[in-house]
Image (tube, helix red, strand yellow):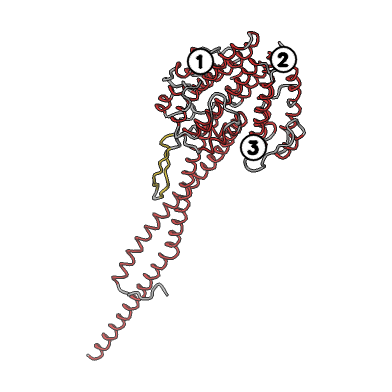
Amino acid sequence: MSATSGIRPTKGYLMETKRRVQIVERGAEFLKLKRDQLAKELTSSLEVLKGRRILLLDNLKEAYNALTAAYLSLGPTEVKSQTRSIKKTLDLEVLPRSVMGVVYPDVKIISTPEIAAELDITLAHAAEKVYEIIEELIQLAEFEARVERIADELGTTNRKVNALENYVIPDMKHVIKFIEDKLDEESMEELVRIKLIGGVKKSAR
Amino acid sequence: MNLGLGYVVLRTHARIADLLTKEQMRTLAEATDIDDFLVKLETTPYGKAEVEADERLALNLEKMFIKKFTERIEEIVKITPTKMGKFLHAYFDFRFEVLNIKRILRGKFTDSSVEEISESLIPIEPYIVKSYNEIVTAENLKESVMKLKGTSYQSLIDKLDLSEQYDALWPLELELNYIYARNILKLTETLPRRDRHIVNSLVKYETDVENVLIAIKRRGKTDVDLDEIFPVTYGISKEDLRKVIDATNLNKAIDELQPPYNEVLAPIKTGDIALVRAMLRKGKYEAATKARAGDQFGFNVILAFLVYSEIEKDNLVGLAWGKVQGLSSEDLMKYIVIPWD
């Protein structure tokens, strides 16, 4: 179906459509600004994410080594048994947070269990390292979720901008041109009709 | 059957020769994987490992090594003259019983199942308690501790309030450490005077190092009640322990400790905390070797053999676990003690 089918070529409709085009164009400009800002945010976030991942891998290696050393020093059964003396667990709170309309989870560590007193020093050291990793993992997961949502939002915004620029606005402009042409045609017909009537009246005199 | 000390010492010398040599231990550590480790183990006095090769292989091998170790103790204790035999029986079985009670209490503290707790126990006959099963199947932690009423572990009942107050297990675990140390030192009085020194030094050395490790763990805390945390101290005084707790510079605090404690704890300065356990074992090994060298025909030889056996057991447990995990021999060798030739 053509964009102009069912359109009433009236001056009122032309004015209304022109007003709407202006609003849509302003909206498209805003979306372009949002898209640019999101792209900027995504680029810088990806850099940070890359750095954090490298750091996390290093820390993971360190924690793994500490845990391995604890197993080698104490034996697997003793390690398993000592971990049973830890009753409390990590207490987390997950709340939604929004930046530029992008909602992502914000994870807060409310409390970490007291582990040092309960475990052998080798295992306590390993557990401390593992808890540090868990905190980093939570922060990284939160950051990754944020980056993912920003990327999704960027994709959506980009599609909206493209749709507005390539379809909606050209279609509306086409409609405006169609109405203007129709109105011009009608006014031309009107002028010819007036001229003809004027000529007939003159010859009748 | 109790035979003369000379005979037991002779038998012990022969048994020391049965322990894995430095080369055998290195060969095991250099095994490419756990299958290779088991093949290499077959060529040692341990022979073919009759264990299930499932996902619990490391735990099964640990059990096997512990069984071998307890058999070694029993064989020697059985033929050792009454007083010494009784002491050695106490020295090892009491220690393992304390470890078993700790494991039971940990399980009860976090409501682990009876099967899980029983699985973690060292397979030895009860030494002081009547039965482990009775403590394992108790309703809760309090009931388990109450089952120890009237035994050498009676003082644990007094620590229950503290445990409940902190909602933690450390008051009970610390008390168990001191019950063991106090009782063993008391038992050494039954030994001839010349044999007491080595036992005293081993127990005191271990207690002192554990005290420093506890102090390190409590570093920076202002509300530490020294009498509550360290009811027994030997070579390292409470003042020294207080210095460690209050130290802003831990490396300096470790350096200021007297030898051999500053040497044993030196790995902490480089961040390799687990190496302290290897150093502790090394210290015990050296003390036993020194005592053995001082008297090749007495009690020291028997005790040295049992200390070596325990270190060998710990090494093999670590190696087997490491091989199951696919760790390299360099990583493994760092944490095991294989100094004998």
Question: Which element carries disc 2, helix, strand or loop?
Answer: loop
Question: Which element carries disc 3, helix, strand or loop?
Answer: helix
Depth-wise, is mark 2 or mark 1 nearer the camera?
2
Nearest to the observer: residue B312 or residue A91? B312
* Mark 3 and mark 1 on one chain: yes
Q: Name the residue under label 3.
A: B60
Task: Residue B333 in the image: state x and y as whole percent.
Answer: 68, 29
Depth-wise, is mark 3 or mark 2 nearer the camera?
2
Task: Residue B106 in the image: state x and y as whole percent.
Answer: 50, 31
Query: Considering the image in quadrants, where does the C terminus of chain A appear?
Result: bottom left
Q: In this view, does A116 lie to the left or right of A99?
A: right
Pinpoint the chain carrying mark 2. B
Q: Which mark is residue B4?
A: 2
Q: Do the residues labelled 3 and 1 touch (CB within 8 Å)?
A: no
Q: Quadrant of residue B259?
A: top right
Pinpoint the chain carrying mark 1. B
User: Identity of the amino acid at label 1?
Assistant: Val
| First along the sequence among labels 3 and 1 | 3
Q: How far is disc 3 from disc 2 in space, using C-alphas? A: 37 Å
Nearest to the observer: residue B128 or residue B202? B128
B130 relative to A104, above or below: above
Q: How far is disc 2 from disc 1 in space, using C-alphas? A: 36 Å
Which residue is located at x 51 percent, y 41 percent? A48
Which residue is located at x 72 percent, y 40 percent? B35
User: Identity of the amino acid at label 3?
Assistant: Asn
Question: Which element carries disc 1, helix, strand or loop?
Answer: loop
Q: Is residue B334 visible?
A: no
Residue reaching furthest to the front:
B1
